[in-house]
Image (cartoon, rainbow, N blue to C red):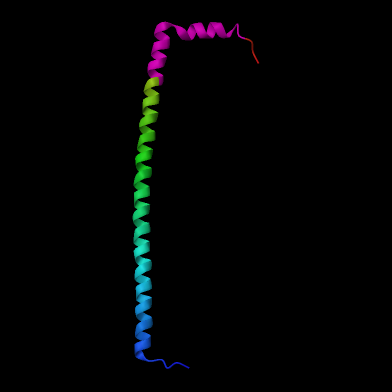
Amino acid sequence: MAEVNQELLFEILRRIQTDVSSVKEGQRDMRQEMVSFRNHMHVMQGDINNLRGTIGQILDRLDRIENRLELRELAEAQARFEPQP
């Protein structure tokens, strides 16, 4: 059986310390990736909110155009003559 001495224990502890350091570095990298992903998601949410606002403005303008050209009343009148499913 191999004799256990302080040099062997010191070497084992050094390997454990190296492994723990490697794990900590990997964890740090993962944390940074999560922060980057979170930031990307926030930017995407802002883009979606901007698109919703733009679509709302377009719908408002379309309603004003339809009202001005009286297209809505024509469409409702035409709908009475369309076959119903």
Pick whichever, 12 or 48, lies toward us: 12
Pick whichever, 68 or 41, lies toward us: 41
Tell me the quarter of the picture where residue 59 sits: top left
10 to 16, vertically: above or below: below
Q: Residue furthest front?
A: 2
18 to 85, vertically: above or below: below
* Residue ID at (37%, 33%): 49
Query: At which x and y percent is residue 18?
Result: 35, 73
Q: Is residue 78 left or right of residue 22?
A: right
Q: Is residue 81 left or right of residue 24?
A: right
Residue 54 forms part of the magenta stretch:
no
* Residue ID at (38%, 67%): 23
The kind of secondary structure the magenta stretch mainly shows is: helix
Tell me the quarter of the picture where residue 11 sits: bottom left
Pick whichever, 73 or 26, lies toward us: 26
Task: Tell me which segment is drawn in magenta.
Answer: 59-82
Query: At which x and y percent is residue 39?
Result: 34, 46
Query: At which x and y percent is residue 37?
Result: 37, 48
39 to 3, vertically: above or below: above
Number of marks in the rendered image: 0
Pick whichever, 66 or 19, lies toward us: 19
* Residue ID at (35%, 90%): 6
* Residue ID at (39%, 19%): 60
Task: Say which quadrant the C terminus sits in.
Answer: top right
